[in-house]
Amino acid sequence: MNDFGIASRHAGFAVVRFVRRYAASAEELWAALTREDQLGRWLGAQVSIQPKVGGVILLRWPGGERMNGAILRCEPPRLLEYSWQENQDEPESTVTFEISSDGSGAVLVLEHRRLDPRSVVGFAAGWHGHLDALAALLCGGTYDLAGSYERLRPVYEARVDSSSLE
């Protein structure tokens, strides 16, 4: 298992998928995905979330960007799915987090579907940095999220052939 996400195409949209193993229990990982204080730390955003089907999620980043979504599936501590709408120019997408226990830790599968193929590199770089920050949070450490996107975007530009996704 490596830390990089995989981009693919499905029904005219792009998908980015990550598989990460964390030294935390499924319950600890679930808390990091659903508790506002923890979610805000690894996403670097102000968070409002109602972790139940039909609940809302709102993310506000310091630069003014925001994301509105609705909880589509919620099965503690193994499955969380919500819609993702950053702006009206992009299609509404869906983020799914699946958690499974793995020995002394847990495995997280993150899949972000229905992305505009032109945006997949940015989403892949963003999620990579956020998942690194999640690992640091779960281990009690810190992570410099501020520079991660700029560092990771060129890596994903080299890894992802966006033209094959269009």
Image (spheres, helix red, strand yellow):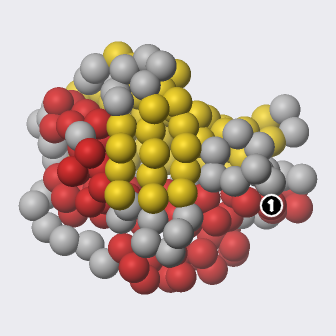
Q: Which residue is painted at 21% across and 63% down in the image?
A: 136
| For residue 66, side relative to residue 121 (left or right) | left
Name above or below for residue 45 compared with residue 49. below
Q: Which residue is painted at 69% across and 74% down in the image?
A: 158
Image coordinates of residue 96 in percent, x first then y, are 50, 33
Q: Which residue is painted at 28% across and 20% down in the image?
A: 76
| For residue 61, side relative to residue 37 (left or right) | right
Instruction: Please count the marks in the image.
Output: 1
Disc 1 is placed on an element classified as helix
Name above or below for residue 37 compared with residue 77. below
In this view of the protein, which residue sits in the foreground, 44 or 5?
44
Image coordinates of residue 163 in percent, x first then y, are 88, 61
Q: Looking at the image, can residue 53 be seen?
A: yes
Name above or below for residue 146 compared with residue 52. below
Image coordinates of residue 95 in percent, x first then y, are 54, 38
Q: Which residue is painted at 35% across and 30% down in the image?
A: 50
Residue 91 figure quarter: top right
